[in-house]
Amino acid sequence: MAETARIAICVPTFKRPVGLKRLLEGINEIDLPDPAPDVKIVIVDNDPDRGAAALIEELKPTLRFPVSYSHQTKRGISPSRNQALNDAGNVDWIVFIDDDERPEKNWLTELLRVQQEYQADVVQGPAEPIYDIDPPAWIVKGNFFRRPRFKTGHLLDRGSTRNILFRADLSHKLGAQFDLRLALLSGEDGLFFRNAYLSGFKIVWADEALVWEWIPEDRMIAKYLIRRQFATGCQDGVIGMTLFKPPKAQLRLIAKAAYRIVYGSLKACAGLILGKRVLVNGIQDIAHGVGRIVGMLGILPEQYRVTQGK
């Protein structure tokens, strides 16, 4: 790493002024390593009404780091991420964090420390949920919003932009940006970093580089959880068909889809006795399996046509 690392913290945003303000206040409070990197914040607003512009102007005088604002007129997360890459300019490292998150103070320091220690091309950190209201007991027991965590240094074969640092020239080396087909489905980050792994780039987990993800009330329902798993299945179908050659990709995806559907059906039946947590989880497995097949066929639902949270 260069003596003074140049870092762009990139934040695509869409109609979440409360979350964006909370995130920027959190970035304002982060610690920096010694020597301190040059940090800037890159905001890309996907709201047709440019809803974040006034907030950015209001907060600019209070922010520690320089911030740029641009407006992406093409709807979707992929064009917004690609614009962020372009707006980042001449930097060494790109960081992505979502507009419904807030980092711990040691967040960036840990991402950089782990990168240096393990000489990684990509460093992934965890995102833990914070609920806007007390969640139903079945949500908590089922861990529906908790994701796997690993020991720092654990090697990964994929990544997610909810909390990640990567080499600024990675997109150039891959010859690819975030896939526009997935603009309103999501999964563009999964495809991008899966491609990076398959191309030989090193992805490492940094367990202490924690961010908190706000979960709004309208996500704490079975309908959302099932729909999300359907979309995840679609993403897996698209990624598999993009990165692996048929018929091998098709056979693998169909086998995995069939397993999820059968296993989920058995689990859902058990859930009729064991309760809502098991029932919903079983239906999620079915939805994921069906979604894989739908994604294979190139049918892409637009789950991000509507955004939850404020």
Image: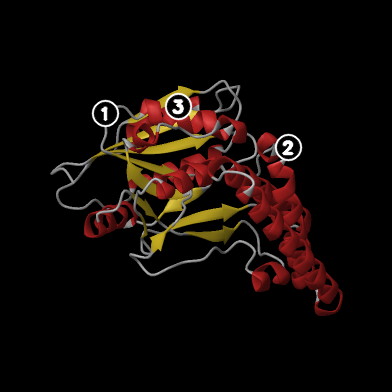
Point out which mark residue 299 bears.
2
Point out which mark residue 149 bears.
none
Residue at numbered disc 3: 83
Q: Is residue 131 visible?
A: yes
Give the amino acid type for the residue marked by disc 2 in the picture.
Ile
- Dot 2, crowdedness within 10 Å: few (<14), some or many (≥20)? few
Is 56 placed above or below 220 here?
above
Quarter of the image where one finds residue 264: bottom right
Point out which mark residue 90 bears.
1
Q: Is residue 263 left or right of residue 115?
A: right
- Dot 3, crowdedness within 10 Å: few (<14), some or many (≥20)? many
Residue 82 on image: x %, y %: 46, 30
- Name the residue: 86% across, 74% down: 272
Element on which disc 2 rests: loop
Label 2 vs 3, first from the N-terminus: 3
- Name the residue: 31% across, 48% down: 121
Is 76 placed above or below 115 here?
above
Q: Is residue 12 left or right of residue 7?
A: right
Spot the residue most to the front: 247
Element on which disc 3 rests: helix
Q: Are marks 2 and 1 in contact (CB under 8 Å)?
A: no
Label 2 vs 1, first from the N-terminus: 1
Measured in 3D between alpha carbons, the distance from the residue under mark 1 to the one under mark 3, in whole angstroms, is 14 Å
Measured in 3D between alpha carbons, the distance from the residue under mark 2 to the one under mark 1, in whole angstroms, is 37 Å
Q: Is residue 310 visible?
A: no
* Along the viewing direction, whichever of 274 and 201 lies nearer the viewer: 201
Measured in 3D between alpha carbons, the distance from the residue under mark 2 to the one under mark 3, in whole angstroms, is 25 Å
* Along the viewing direction, whichever of 185 and 225 lies nearer the viewer: 185
Residue 278 on image: x %, y %: 76, 72
- Name the residue: 39% across, 36% down: 174
Residue 110 on image: x %, y %: 30, 58
Give the amino acid type for the residue marked by disc 3 in the picture.
Gln
